[in-house]
Structures are given as C-alpha cells and as structure tokens.
C-alpha cells in the first residue's frame, strides 16, 4: 500500500504543478464555466483518449497522459464549481490552490479506503478500461445533471468526479509503470 501511495502522490504532484502553472497563466478563467460545461470538457478529453487508443496514434503532439492529467484537474475544477458556482467573489491563486489541495486530500482518502477494500484490483486493469470507466462515469454524471442533481439511490456528481480522478491517476501510474 505504501508503494501505491508513493506512486499516487507522484502523479498528483505532476497534476498539481500543471494546475498551478495554468492558474498562474490564466487565473481562474474556468470560473465562468457552468458545471455541465466542465463535465463536457472532461468528456472531450476522455473521448480523445479513447480515439487515440483505438487508432493507435495521435496527430496532435500531446498523448493520452496529458489528457488523463487534464481529466484529473478538470474534475477538481468541477468539484470546486459544485461548491462555489453561485459565488460571485473572485478567488486568489492561493485560495484556489488551497481548494485544489482540499479536493486532493478528500479524493486520496477515498482511494485509500477503496484500495483497501478492493485489494488493489486496479493493478490488474488495462489503461483502456480506465478510459471506459471514466466514460461510463461521465454518462452517469450527465444523466444526474440532466435530472437537476436528483438521484434515487445513486451517489451524486461529486462522487463520480472523485472516481474519475482516481481512475485517471491509476491510468497514469499504469502508463508510467508497465508490467
């Protein structure tokens, strides 16, 4: 489990650095996005990954690793927007990174619990399965959004974002540590 946590934290460091750099470059321009638009942005990234996996190549000089990082970071944006969409106040770069870190900690804690219960089953999975699971979670999220966030027995949008974050990190670990 310590090995998993080390790998997990390493991938998060990469995601966080890119998020922080983009936050420096663009500020919180993403705050204009409605929550549904964030879900669609994640969908675009996941569909691009699947397209590259199916075609075996990319014509744009960014591979699937970049897209998994983007999925992770957009899920954090989604979680922040779920909580602060109606807020009109601007957030500083420091406040945004603190929110980022809070979402990372909550999602990491979820991963540790699930990883314990599932016995690291994800290590037996293919990267393409993580892609498919993310796409499934996106379809679920879109349905929940279309139902105005109401579910009868299912977890909410936030839980789907957190699962997608963990699948993205597992995919990155798998890509960087092939069997």
Image (cartoon, rainbow, N blue to C red):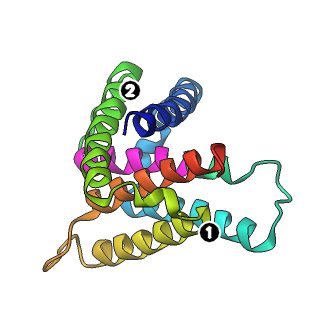
Front-most of residues 3 and 8: 3
Q: CA distance from mark 2 to mark 1?
A: 28 Å
The quarter of the picture where residue 158 lies is bottom left
Main SS type for the magenta part? helix
Residue picked out by circle 2? 97
- Residue most toward the top? 94
Residue 122, x across and y down, in percent: 45, 59
Note whether residue 62 is visible: yes
The residue located at (24%, 49%) in the rendering is 113
**Which sits earlier in the primary sequence, circle 2 or circle 1?**
1
The residue located at (39%, 64%) in the rendering is 36
User: Is 64 colored magenta in this rendering?
Assistant: no
Residue 60, x across and y down, in percent: 82, 54
Residue 100 — which label? none
- Residue most toward the left? 152
Residue 102, x across and y down, in percent: 28, 33
Tags 2 and 1 touching, CB below 8 Å: no
The residue located at (51%, 62%) in the rendering is 124
In this image, 3 relative to 157: left or right?
right
Note whether residue 86 is visible: no
In this image, 136 relative to 22: left or right?
left
Residue 47 — which label? 1
In this image, 39 relative to 154: left or right?
right
Front-most of residues 72 and 3: 3
Query: Label 2 crowding class (10 Å Cα cut-off): few <14, some 14-19, many 20+?
Result: some
Front-most of residues 85 and 15: 15
Q: Which residues are magenta?
A: 69-85
> Is label 2 in a helix, a strand or a loop?
helix
Count of labels in the image: 2
The quarter of the picture where residue 120 lies is bottom left
Classify 160 as above or below 9.
below
Q: Quadrant of the N terminus?
A: top left
């Amino acid at each position: 489990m310590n090995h998993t946590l080390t790998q997990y934290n390493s991938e998060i460091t990469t995601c966080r650095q890119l998020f922080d750099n983009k936050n420096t470059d663009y500020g919180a321009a993403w705050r204009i996005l409605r929550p549904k638009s964030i879900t669609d942005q994640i969908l675009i990234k996941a569909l691009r990954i699947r397209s590259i996996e199916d075609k075996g190549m990319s014509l744009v000089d960014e591979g699937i690793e970049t897209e998994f990082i983007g999925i992770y970071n957009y899920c954090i944006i989604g979680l922040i927007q779920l909580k602060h969409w109606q807020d009109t106040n601007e957030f500083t770069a420091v406040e945004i990174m603190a929110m980022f870190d809070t979402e990372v900690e909550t999602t990491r804690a979820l991963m540790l619990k699930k990883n314990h219960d599932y016995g690291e089953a994800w290590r037996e999975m293919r990267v393409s399965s993580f892609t498919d699971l993310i796409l499934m979670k996106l379809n679920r999220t879109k349905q929940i959004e279309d139902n105005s966030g109401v579910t009868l027995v299912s977890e909410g949008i936030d839980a789907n974002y957190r699962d997608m974050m963990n699948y993205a990190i597992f995919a990155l670990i798998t890509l960087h540590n092939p069997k």
